[in-house]
């Protein structure tokens, strides 16, 4: 029996009913032979403090849960908005907690930035992922400007071009896991 690939989705938006979460859910629905889960605890991760980041005693359950979910995942797919030309604070904070743990070292990562324009956050996240030494194939990244025009009021993706782009992205990410 072949092991199912485990993908961990990380949503950079904390909004209830977020379109970014809907994008992750859409991608998950296109890969039925993959175990795809979305991490639910980004908002619970406290502000990063290097004084408290010790390998043997992290005092925060949310940090341990995040690191554990990353460790168990074969790949990660981040979908995020851009806030004030940058990475949403909760997402950046969560990533900061992984620096010392090496949670992203050689981990295949896909990145979707969906925003009005989004190029600043996208570029910043690629730099952060590079610093974390994540394995990011350029073809497993997607910048979706004006993404709301590609979705309906129920956050369903209505743009066939975007559907194809997401399909290609997940195929590249899965091929990265296999290689």
Image (cartoon, helix red, strand yellow):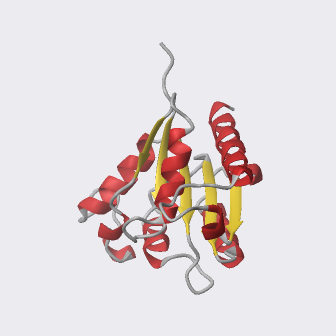
Give the side of residue 146 with respect to residue 83, left or right. Answer: right
**Does 9 sit above or below residue 112?**
above
**Does 26 sit above or below residue 91?**
above
Observer-nearest of 100 and 141: 141
Give the side of residue 165 with respect to residue 111, left or right. Answer: right
Q: Can you see residue 163?
A: yes
Residue 119 in percent (x, y) is at: 71, 74
Observer-nearest of 74 and 51: 74
Which residue is at 62% across, 36% downward? Answer: 177
Give the side of residue 166 with respect to residue 94, left or right. Answer: right
Residue at the outermost bottom position: 84
Which residue is at 36% across, 68% downward? Answer: 16
Give the side of residue 19 with respect to residue 51, left or right. Answer: right
**Does 43 sit above or below residue 155?**
below
**Does 3 sit above or below residue 176?**
above
Residue 63 in percent (x, y) is at: 33, 61
Name the quadrant of the C terminus: top right
Which residue is at 34% across, 76% downward? Answer: 51
Residue 146 in percent (x, y) is at: 67, 72
Which residue is at 70% across, 58% downward? Answer: 142
Observer-nearest of 5 and 51: 5
Residue 175 in percent (x, y) is at: 68, 35
């Amino acid at each position: 029996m072949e092991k199912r690939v485990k993908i961990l989705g990380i949503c950079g938006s904390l909004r209830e009913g977020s379109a970014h979460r809907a994008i992750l859910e859409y991608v998950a629905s296109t890969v039925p032979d993959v175990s795809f889960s979305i991490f639910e605890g980004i908002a619970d991760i406290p502000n990063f403090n290097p004084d408290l980041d010790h390998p043997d005693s992290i005092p925060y359950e949310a940090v341990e849960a995040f690191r554990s979910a990353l460790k168990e995942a074969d790949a990660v797919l981040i979908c995020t908005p851009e806030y004030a030309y940058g990475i949403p604070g909760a997402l950046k904070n969560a990533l900061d907690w992984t620096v010392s743990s090496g949670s992203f070292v050689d981990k295949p990562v896909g990145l979707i930035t969906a925003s009005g324009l989004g190029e600043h956050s996208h570029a910043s996240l690629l730099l952060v992922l590079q610093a974390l030494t994540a394995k990011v194939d350029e073809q497993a990244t997607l910048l979706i400007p004006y993404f709301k025009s590609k979705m309906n009021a129920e956050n369903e993706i209505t743009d066939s071009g975007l559907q194809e782009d997401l399909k290609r992205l997940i195929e590249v990410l899965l091929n990265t896991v296999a290689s």
